[in-house]
Image: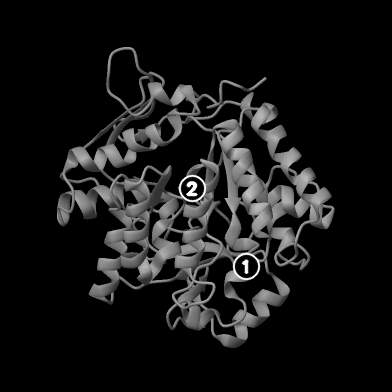
Amino acid sequence: YDQVATEGRPINYGFSASWLFARIAEKEGMEPDGDLAFFQKAQGRKGWQHTLATPDETARILARIERGLAEGAIGIGVLAGYAPGYGRKEAFAVAQLAAKHGVPAFTHARYMSVIEPNSSFEGLAELVSLAAATGAHMHIHHLNSISTRDIPRIALMLKGAQARGLRVTTEAYPYGAGSTVVGAELFRGNWRERMGGATAGDIELAGRPFDDATLAEAQEKTPGAWIVAHFMRPDRNPADQAFLDESVLMPGGAIASDAMPWTTPAGEPVPGDLWPLPADAIAHPRSAGTFTRFLRDYVRERRKVTLLEGLSRMSLIPARILEGSVPQMKAKGRLQVGKDADLVVFDLATVSDRATFARPNQTATGMRHVVVNGTPIIRDGELVREARPGRPIRRSAAK
């Protein structure tokens, strides 16, 4: 963290302490190198997704997480869906640790499925129970992709938990497709049934759908390859659009991009300082279009929320989710004298995403100016490449 924090960045940034990386390190003897390549390499190994941690292993996992928190991490990242067989006692211990340090546990649910047992409903019920039992703040990642078509039942459960004072918050992105590695546990076993009748053609690599044979080959030979998976089809099915809307517009929920790394068609990472991106650079379109898509679709075109509420979901609500444990966030998300000068100026009549699943690297339109800590990084619609005003966001307990 300290090494990264000394380098200039265009935007403000922070990190969570990764439970998953700590678990892989202890179960596989692999030391994290701070790069997603570590995660991709681990997909070819089978010892960490469905094995219980011993008491000693659990203690070492927790110690790794605590070191990350001591270095300034803003919470604990819990990618439970990638290791769904980990123990309930381990999950409880991680929640206890989050409560002890007063930080959110940024959680993916253990399961992504519309059928029981091992359903999304069960996975989210586990998070509610952990919040109730430990007092930890459970922040649920990607309510849209975790809940899919079970969102009506799941929303009732989460609203009930919130009404009873549990610290449960949510976020979502405005797409009916997610992105992960092709070798993820999500795509093992009866995954088609669990995802509500999905097919191999709902999974794409570089914009090209798989079939059963090519999917099996990719899972065997290149399990760390990044793919896009359509878990709902709102462009084809009005019911799916309604399910997506309920997740995205969960009361008090934030909009989050879950931006993915840019890669070449061969799967090699695109250098972080390369601009413009290569014409064939690949990622989920949410990496380029999430917030302008939300403004275009939910605010301007379909008027699902007012402009004020839409802006709040992208600024003030995320700040409030974090500010209880990260005091710096009290200066974010507000346009007030004395707060940080992080400003976005856009034309509501023209602001729009252009990124598609076929051409994900198209930049958005309608953004006129973006200011970070008082310094423009976009001026008159053009990127200011030399600007590096971003600052690390740290917990005040960091040494």
Q: Quadrant of the N terminus?
A: top right
Q: Position of residue 98 (x, y in %)?
A: 59, 39
Check disc 2 and report the residue beneath it. Answer: 132
Q: Compare residues 267 and 73 and report the one nearer the observer.
A: 73
Dot 1 amino acid type: Ala
Q: Position of residue 231 (x, y in %)?
A: 42, 71
Q: Residue at x 69, y 28 (%)?
A: 3
Check disc 1 and report the residue beneath it. Answer: 184
Q: Position of residue 379 (x, y in %)?
A: 33, 28
Q: Is residue 170 left or right of residue 242?
A: right
Q: Residue furthest top?
A: 338
Q: CA distance from mark 1 to mark 2?
A: 30 Å
**Would you call the spot at circle 1 few (<14 residues within 10 Å), some (14-19), or many (20 or more)?**
many
Nearer the camera: disc 1 or disc 2: 2
Q: Is residue 36 visible?
A: no
Q: Position of residue 219 (x, y in %)?
A: 66, 75
What secondary structure is marked by label 2? Answer: helix
